[in-house]
Image (cartoon, helix red, strand yellow):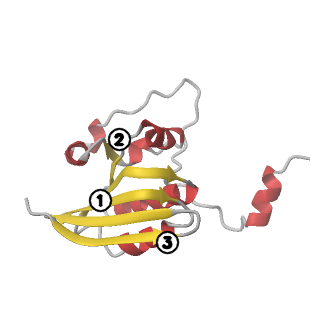
Amino acid sequence: MSVELVVEDRAATRRSALSIGCERQGNLVLVALEGELDMYTVARFWERVEHFDPVEVQLVIDLSGVGLLDSAGLSALVILRNEADRRGARLGLICPHRRLLGIFGLTGLRGVFAVGDDLAAVCAELAADPSARRQAPVPAGAKIVDIAGVRRPPGLDQGERGRAWRRN
């Protein structure tokens, strides 16, 4: 299998730094991240991944080198996953760190990505029958909400949301 280096970029701000390396391996594109995927670096991340068509290439994001994943970074991954899902594809994540896996577990997003400790594990997950995937047990009486598909209700602006969460 040939490996071709497509691009490497480094975004740095006073607070955050992110290196982005892209490799094409056949019809798979591996995007390796090193640093923080946060509100300061997510725009650069989008610049690098937005031109990949999830129908034409299998996109796998390598989070092995990510030290910080904030809500902006998580949101970018969910949006990328939702775009792939709408087009009939899946997004793979290499995520060997329990700390980051915990974020996906706590938010209910662990099952919506093809996740593995390394590229081989992610490829195996991508090739597996989605209906055969293990589902986490749900406690009796718990309400299941698919937050990966949730959209903000129309008319709910920031001001209304802020007031709804404020306690008197």
Residue 32 in percent (x, y) is at 32, 59
Closer to the N terminus: mark 3 or mark 2? Answer: 3
The amino acid type, in three-letter code, at marker 2 is Pro
- Residue 155 vs residue 44, the one in the foreground: 44
Q: Which mark is residue 89?
A: 1
Q: For numbered disc 1, what is the local secondary structure?
A: loop
Q: For numbered disc 3, what is the local secondary structure?
A: helix
Residue 65 in percent (x, y) is at 38, 51
Name the residue: 23% across, 42% down.
Answer: 121
**Mark 2 Cα-neighbour bin, 10 Å: few <14, some 14–19, many ≥20:** some
Q: Which mark is residue 43?
A: 3
Q: CA distance from mark 1 to mark 2?
A: 22 Å
The amino acid type, in three-letter code, at marker 3 is Ala
The amino acid type, in three-letter code, at marker 1 is Ala
Residue 123, compared with residue 76, is above or below; it is above
Residue placed under numbered mark 2 in the picture: 96
Residue 157, compared with residue 114, is above or below; it is below
Displayed quadrant of residue 22: bottom left
Residue 63, compared with residue 51, is above or below; it is above
Residue furthest to the right in view is 168
Name the residue: 20% across, 45% down.
Answer: 120
- Name the side, left or right, on which 126 lies relative to 82: left
Is residue 133 in view from this perspective?
Answer: yes
Residue 157 in percent (x, y) is at 73, 67
Closer to the N terminus: mark 3 or mark 1? Answer: 3
- Residue 159 vs residue 4, the one in the foreground: 4
Q: For numbered disc 2, what is the local secondary structure?
A: loop
